Amino acid sequence: MNVKEALMAGAEKSIFLNDIEVDPKTIKAVLINEVVPLDPTDDFYGATDGAYLSTTLPLFQQAGIYVDSAHDLLDLGIYLTNAIKTPKHATTIETQTITENLPLLEKELSLFPNIEVIMLMGDVAKKAFNQIAKKQQKKNAIPSVATYKIRQTEIYYGKIRLLPSYIMTGKNVLIEKSKVTMAAEDIAKMYQVITKE
């Protein structure tokens, strides 16, 4: 299945979608990042030396998952995506923007029937997923508190384990070392869940 083709029906041309082939049944974990980059080649499935991978792959390696590409992650059943499918042009992302992008994210998640874990990498991902949960079950899936307060809490959305964590892309990842450490710990936890280790 080509993810971009599966999601493009009726989508705007300015929307960035993952143009990759995936066997949807093999995906066990989805990591939802904040927003697509300005340049599609910097996204997870863009150039092999793209900006997003330059911060994401080291997080996986710090978690003990030695991979060299986003395709290596796909081989492990791990899919990377962004909550917001259009580049941001301001420092913050408005709630309305999250709401406008929700149908594509919902459709994207529905492509994968065997998801065991969804990692919410940052506040925008948490807000987006909470909007999805409110539509389905009339309440937030993730409590509206600081991430560090709920990282150790087991949270489920149906049978899917939700792991709130920290953003895995951007310059802040290079600065906030404690959040990098916590994100790597969360990734290791995700991997334990999907591998049953």
Image (tube, grey):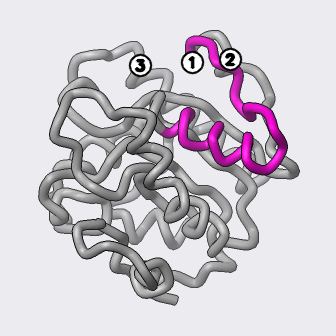
**Whole-number angstrom distance, CA of label 3 to CA of label 2:** 14 Å
- Residue 147 higher or lower than 17, as above or below: above
User: Is residue 153 shown in magenta?
Assistant: no
In the picture provided, is 84 more to the left or to the right than 173? right
Which element carries disc 1, helix, strand or loop? helix
Q: Which residue position is annotated with label 2?
A: 150
Secondary structure of the residue carrying numbered label 3? helix
Identified by mark 2, the residue type is Ile
18 or 84, nearer to the observer: 84
| Residue drawn where x is 47% and y is 78% of the image | 7
Disc 3 to disc 1, C-alpha distance: 10 Å
Q: Dot 1: few (<14), some (14–19), or many (≥20) neighbours within 10 Å?
A: some
* Magenta range: 125-146
Amino acid found under the numbered disc labelled 1: Thr
Q: Are marks 2 and 1 in contact (CB under 8 Å)?
A: yes
Eye-nearest disc, 3 or 1: 1
Of residues 76 and 34, the one drawn nearer to the viewer in this rendering:
34
Q: Nearer the viewer, residue 104 or 182?
A: 104
Q: Position of residue 91 (x, y in %)?
A: 21, 28
Mark 1 lies on residue:
147
Residue 45, picture quadrant? bottom left
Q: Are marks 3 and 2 in contact (CB under 8 Å)?
A: no
Q: Is residue 53 visible?
A: no
Q: Residue at x 55, y 68 (%)?
A: 108
Please tell me how crowded label 2 is: few (under 14), some (14-19), or many (20+) other residues with Cα within 10 Å: some
Q: Residue at x 56, y 34 (%)?
A: 126
The crowding category of the residue bearing disc 3, from other C-alpha atoms within 10 Å (few below 14, some 14 to 19, many at least 20), is some
Amino acid bearing label 3: Lys
Q: Earlier in the sequence, mark 3 or mark 2?
A: 2
Residue at image mark 3: 179
Does the image show residue 156?
Answer: yes
Answer left or right for 115 relative to 37.
right
